[in-house]
Amino acid sequence: MAMIAKQCPEIPVHVVDLNQPRIDAWNSDQLPIYEPGLDAVVREARGRNLTFSTQVDRAIDESDMIFISVNTPTKTFGIGAGRAANLEFIEKCARQIARNAKGHKIVVEKSTLPVRTAEAVKRILGSEGYGATFDVLSNPEFLAEGTAISDLLDPDRVLIGGESNEAIETLCDVYARWIPRERILTTNLWSSELSKLTANAFLAQRVSSINAISALCEATGADVDEVSRAIGTDSRIGPKFLKASVGFGGSCFQKDILNLVYLCEHFGLRDVAAYWEQVVSMNDYQKRRFSERIVKTMFNTVSDKKIGILGFAFKKDTNDTRESAAIYVCRDLLRERARLAIYDPRVGEQQIRADLAAACTELNGQLTDHERELIQTNVTVVNDSYEAADGAHAVAVMTEWDEFRELDYAKIYQSMHRPAFVFDGRNLLDHEALSELGFEINAIGKCPERRSRN
Ligand code: UDX
């Protein structure tokens, strides 16, 4: 919305939410999310044609077009728990729009939704019976965190699904102010909704595919980065999303695939569901494999050993930790009774402890006293990488923050126990240089004994 306000100064954009502290943060100098370049965009438009408030009813009444941008987390209870999307917030939102709308409104689904949710939204809007009329459009968002501003300024495509050409044209006109028309794709409602789930499933599938091959590389002596480069230069495959890692994270990939799986099952397509579910299973395997490799390499025990964890966010340039591989690797190491010193340039202590507690709690379960105690006593959150490594038996890179490349590794080596292990979950570091310093390197898709030529 900030980008629309920036690019279309004559369109008033009201961002409304029920959560007062969050709105206060959007009105302050400390925005509630970290995203490179976002501050400048908000600063330019805020107070001009961009406002943040909790006056939801009033904004609905005053607007011609209303974007529903609430979250749709995976259900944790009832039918479809662990797979289906929780649509409670979408429904509440639609009902509030219906209660407060007059005349004609265009309602745009921005949240990622299972296919045919627009139909439900349309029925809810029509059923409250206050006389307003509605068109419903689907306009999924494809930006990635960390690169949101450039993704929004110069997207590969914008997708708009709907039934009314007039409503579609109205939204096209907004984006066409800065995006070439040929990159604005229009489809029917269901295609648009399904395309978002499918795009994320395909992207995640590429990561799981290369991660599957990384296990084979470790066993055989092939180097996964070399394999990636070799296959990525085939123009039919392409170079992107082939970086082997400790596992994909983020708020979308797993959630959207599980949604797709649930949909397939709902329609009786069991084989299709099983096919896509395997992408998530492979990701779980990759995360588990990494923590098991740490334990195995460190003489089959990490109990009471200090391990420095570099990075906790699910990728660099964001403070988002949702589904971050780091959470699960840290949980597994804690269960092995390691002592963890965790550092992330953008993620704070409260978030890290909350994520670990949530990961230790099984679905609908309780945090055991033992695990609460482990998180309390065996986790410290530190202020830099040197503190994380000081006196440690190992350091593990979990997020590909640029600053981890620039560290003084000679100094780090001096401060660690011997052998000084490095587990590079992102293949970020210069392994050759680190081995020369004396480190024992373990990296994704690389066999320690058979180092590659470069
Ligand atoms: C994703 C989609 O890219 C975006 O289009 C959609 O709107 C939301 O979901 P995001 O979750 O922000 O965006 O991050 P993305 O860059 O896609 O990365 C997802 C995860 O995959 C990260 O944990 C990342 O580290 C991992 N990844 C990505 C890899 O492990 N290897 C790769 O080659 C690429």
Image: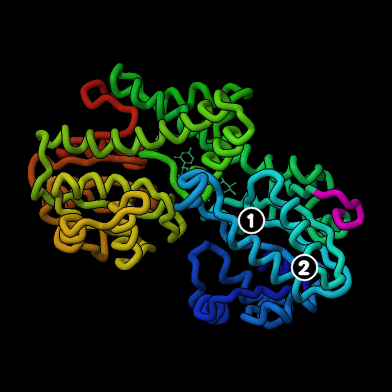
Q: What label sits on residue 280 in the rendered view?
A: none
User: Residue 54 at what x, y percent from top left?
Assistant: 62, 80
Please give the residue where the numbered disc 2 appears in the rendered image: 128
Identify the mark nearer the N-term, 1 or 2.
Answer: 1
Q: Is residue 165 magenta?
A: yes
Residue at the (37%, 63%) spot, across then down: 347
Q: Is residue 408 magenta?
A: no
Q: Is residue 397 visible?
A: yes
The type of residue carrying mark 1 is: Ser
Q: Quadrant of the C terminus?
A: top left
Q: Nearer the viewer, residue 144 or 389?
A: 144
Q: Residue furthest top?
A: 220
The type of residue carrying mark 2 is: Glu
Question: Dot 2: few (<14), some (14–19), or many (≥20) neighbours within 10 Å?
Answer: some
Please give the residue where the numbered disc 1 appears in the rendered image: 111
User: Residue 423 at what x, y percent from top left?
Assistant: 25, 40
Picture quadrant where residue 109 is located: bottom right
Picture quadrant where residue 23 is located: bottom right
Question: Dot 1: few (<14), some (14–19), or many (≥20) neighbours within 10 Å?
Answer: some
Task: Classify 343 as above or below 274.
Answer: below
